Image: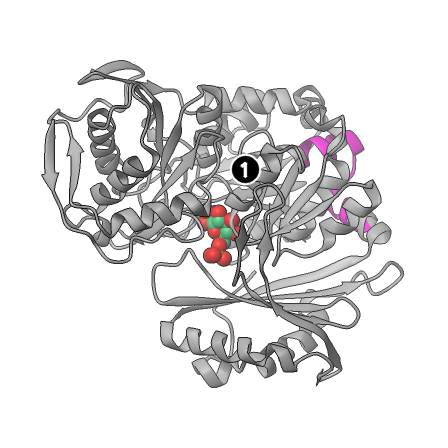
Amino acid sequence: MTTYKTTPYEGQKPGTSGLRKKVRVFQQPGYAENFIQAVFDVVEPAPGAVLVIGGDGRYHNRTVIQQAIRMAAANGYGQVLVGQGGILSTPAASNVIRQYKASGGLILSASHNPGGPDEDFGIKYNIANGGPAPESVTDAIYARTQTIDRYLALDTPDIDLDTLGTVEVGACRVTVLDPVADYADLMERLFDFATIRAAVAGGLTMAFDAMHAVTGPYATEILEKRLGFAPGTVRNGVPLEDFGGHHPDPNMVHAKELFDLMFSEAAPDFGAASDGDGDRNLIVGKHRFVTPSDSLAMLAANAHLAPGYAKGLAGIARSMPTSAAADRVAASLGIPAFETPTGWKFFGNLLDAGMATICGEESAGTGSDHVREKDGLWAVLLWLNILAVRKISVDALARKHWAKFGRNYYARHDYEALPTEQADALMAALKASLGALPGRKVGPLRVETADSFSYLDPVDGSTSANQGLRVLFEGGSRIVFRLSGTGTQGATLRVYLERYEPVGGDLDRETPEMLADLIAAADELAGITRHTGRTAPDVVT
Ligand code: G16
């Protein structure tokens, strides 16, 4: 074992979901090592503890995995479980941590951000429940990165990551496991595969875009092999280190080909996509896009149709910027609805305490208590299960849902790569103005309340402040402003727009026209153009 001298790097503060930086930043000598050692120093693994390591297969994955194995062995872990080829989707990694009772896991991913030598990389630590480390742990990791002066590693050669089996690295057993099998079995326990298979045999068709990211092997095994969808149902199914040069972000912009297909004459019944590390999802029916917020509400309203949720839900949790559509479902089911800050880590306590069963976010994440991460394929399979049982199209299901609950028209406008000072100045000015907003008229809208969102965790009593600025209007419309915590270049301003149309109202209109007043109000309230010079968002989802 060698003790390597090192000095701290600035800026190793985990964001919404771990440390994300450009590959070139991670390639600096000791950069990844400092962060990993900081994790080990903070979590202080018990002698012989089990660590899971997996990644989304992006560029630089294998290099960091090999080093992480040498460091885990030097830091006293007794066993490392690593996905074959270094691959584990984020939900699959969460499952492996839980299933094999590991003390935690390192997930190497920058999620939906692009990959390649000039693109993004990331490292996230998950705790023993399988979920992202809470803020108390990530804050401690960050503090440690600022004082770190050494890291420990064995002087051993790289292991063969592509061959299943166990090898010794020093006193540590390193097991290369099949990344797909355990996860696919879990899905088969949660969902009614026989009913879905029957629907497929009866003509149900779908297209799944794996975006050359981690879900390709999972989707091929589950959708084509176990459920019987036709070969070719999974598109872009081979994981590539640079995702084929695209952003593996399943939205209308980056999954445009799938979108165009789903709105064409040749559309199959159901379309879906997942992101770089397999935790996000896109749901689009024939000629019907379902917003992630609506998807959460529709899944929650119908989850009892799947065997894994037949007993009903304990509660539904959503992040604050996610639309309130799921709250209406919770109210009708007579179960609690929770509103947390952005970041899956905030759902962990609610899930562990059995207070929530299904969680979701506007950022295309939905999941349940089966693991402690959001889960792209899980959402796809729950949709398929529901469609197969109800024998209904996505469009018809959405219309029935809105007829019963009303419709939350919703969009997110992103202003990317802003100079950080501009974005900070915009947020500071808006925050300072919040107190004076109630009662103010903005176009046809009147502000009811405005605040900076703060979350009191009902399980551990911790408080997380400054989690986004909210302007709520009379009638239930609202705008939320936040800076992204996952970008790697400058700042990204996210503007979340929501308008509620009650039952009997205008339920079948185009989203942009329904949100026009809110879009104008957002600029008037926050001075987006004044502060940034931008007149339109870069991405609308
Ligand atoms: C991560 C988090 C999500 C969050 C999303 C967007 O997703 O896990 O909880 O909603 O980032 O965060 P932000 O608005 O700060 O960019 P992922 O899929 O990138 O890991």
Residue 262 appears at what percent x and percent y?
62, 49
Quarter residue 476 falls in: bottom right
Q: Position of residue 319 (x, y in %)?
A: 60, 52
Horizontal relation, residue 281 to residue 278: left or right: right
Is 371 inside the magenta-drawn segment?
Answer: no
**Could you say which is closer to the camera, residue 242 or residue 361?**
361
Foreground of the two, 245 or 360: 360
The extreme right residue here reads 504
Q: Residue furthest front?
A: 461
The N terminus lies in quadrant? top left
Give the quarter of the figure containing the C terminus. bottom right
The amino acid type found where label 1 is placed reads Asp
Q: Is residue 105 visible?
A: yes
> What is the number of callouts on the image?
1
Q: Nearer the viewer, residue 57 or 418?
A: 418
Percent coordinates x, y for residue 143 in the rendering: 31, 50
| Residue holding disc 1 | 375
Residue at figure coordinates x 17%, y 33% from the top left: 152
Queried whether the magenta region covers residue 385, the answer comes back as: yes
**What span is colored magenta in the figure?**
383-399
Q: Residue at x 58, y 33 (%)?
A: 352
Q: Is residue 51 above or below residue 63?
A: above
Asked if 147 appears above or below 189 in the picture, the reply is below
Magenta stretch, overall SS: helix
